[in-house]
Image (cartoon, rainbow, N blue to C red):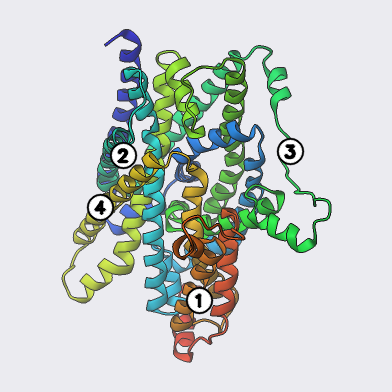
Amino acid sequence: MNFSITLDVLVLLAYFGAIIGVGLSQRSKSGSVEGFALGDRQIAWWAVLASILAAEISAATFLGAPGEGYAKRNWTYAQLAIGTILARVFVSVVFIPIYYRHGVISIYEFLGTRFGPVTRKLASATFLVTRVLAMGTRLYVSAIIVVLAVQLWRGQPATAQEKFLLFTGALVFVTMLTALYTTVGGIRAVIWTDFIQVGVLVAALAFTIFFVLGKIDGGWATVAQHVQQPVFFDFLPMKEGEGVGAWLARMLSEEYTVYAAVIASTFVTMATHGIDQDTVQRMLTAKNRRQSAFATIMSGLVDFPVVSAFILIGVLLAVYYKANPVPNLPTEDREIFPFFILTQMPAGLRGLVTAGILATAMGSLSTALNALATSFARDFALPRLERDGILVDEWQRVRVLRQSTVLFAGLIIVVGVVTAWYMSHHPEARIIPLVLGILGFTFGSLLGLFLVGLFTRTRGNDLGNTLAVVAGIIAVLFASGVHTKLFGAPDAQPAFVLAFPWRITLGTLVTFAVAVLFRTPADRLAARDKVDATTA
């Protein structure tokens, strides 16, 4: 092993050692359900902020956002940050106070109080299935750099089967390592390792930008000449002879427009930061609702420059490779950044940026595992075991949480393996729409239920909510053209396909509209008022 590879390996080992050490050190503070799931609500706001960032910046962002910047050579993807900031303010004012007042651990407990046990379990089950699928599809992305490294070492492209095996080995390793410290240390391990991972991420970003820029003749002036219009805001001007209806259809089928940024992105972030246990659980570890709200809003303000920096890397790489073409440059946009890391970066820095990719993968995975285990245990396993008299002490309850963590690690590996096979055989697929599209099919329905619960007093019940969720999901599937792909001719193309940022908006509106048609039973109103009086 030559010196450069040795240095990269040492950097990676130091990273893994720090993560595992910090994660395992939190075991003694995770001996209760409240401690394992919420850190006894004693986490500092700045650590919560770092954990929220780590949860939402996955390896898909680390490689997918540069891929978008490389392909488009502008920041139209970043304009979606407008809605993420607006939604965070809404979540901080509306959702967080309710969760703290009710003292929930699984946020779907609120739906149980408001509507009944069927709605609670339906929402929790929808979250569990969706998050496992979304996390599994994200996970394989971190292994892209492993495949490229092997291809460069061999001097020839890997076959689809070889890519699949490499993807599988890497994602199993990352998942098992992350599951180890998450199972032992609970949410405290997640948050403090997230803090380290965000530090590695920021360092990797800063070094990469200045390193790539230094390799471009003319620096910023050259880069500015290659940026494509629109640079940031895409107002989607109406074409000559285009009617309003045709323009609306085009607007709803475009992914990155100012309308998607202001409207659709707001609904997306309300869902991911208001009704998604994965992110909300981090918010609920803060000492009080004010610190939680501050961390949430600040995470949006910090997230914008971070995502913009990822896109900038893609733009810089597009300029660099246009001036310095190479014969073996990958044809897949998502592989350009890892290819540059492996072929151009010096030893040590290459190891740091690789650690950054792994950091984003492990950060989002650890939060998902903890949230999945918490929701499953609180909404399904623990109530049943306690009702049957099987669980009698806190240690047994925490053991169920740890066993649930291991269970979902296995399920995520299965989804990751399936995704790896698909992406190995369909290299033209894009990362960002794949990951966000999965959430779009169901999270709109969940958001619709929460909005009914928050903004109405006498509307919604278990039966109506079930029908509303089904209607919302069907509406999104239909608008996304899934029916044409499943039941149409092999080469048939749907006349209209709703862009992925708009899916949650549609699902929310349909679910809300159906759910409010049903009245809340009187006994449920009385039970809810009793709980509200107790928690006021």
Which callout, 3 or 4, points to the residue nearer the camera?
3
- Amino acid type at circle 4 is Gly
Locate the N terminus by quadrant.
top left
- The label shown at residue 171 is 2
Location of residue 527 in the rendering, given as x and y in whole percent from the top left corner: 44, 84
Instruction: Calculate the distance from the C-alpha at mark 4 to the C-alpha at mark 2.
Output: 29 Å
The span from disc 3 to disc 1 (Cα, nearest Å) is 39 Å
Distance from Cα at disc 4 to Cα at disc 1: 39 Å
Q: Residue at x 36, y 54 (%)?
A: 132
Task: Report the front residue among 330 and 298.
Answer: 330
Type of amino acid under label 1: Ala
Q: Is residue 152 left or right of residue 309?
A: left
Q: Would you name the residue on which mark 3 appears? A: 230
Q: Is residue 524 left or right of residue 506?
A: left
Residue plotted at (50% across, 45% down):
45
Location of mark 4 (residue): 31
Q: Which residue ends up furthest to the right in the rendered image?
A: 240
Q: Position of residue 325 (x, y in %)?
A: 56, 17
| As drawn, 108 above or below 335 | below
Quadrant hosting residue 37: bottom left
> What separation in Å lies between label 1 and label 2 (alpha carbons)?
36 Å
Sequence-first tag of 4 and 2: 4
Q: Amino acid at mark 2?
A: Leu
Q: Picture coordinates of residue 395 (x, y %)?
A: 20, 58
Residue, disc 1: 468
Q: Secondary structure at mark 2?
A: helix
Q: Nearer the viewer, residue 162 or 5?
A: 162
Whole-angstrom CA distance, mark 2 to mark 3, is: 37 Å
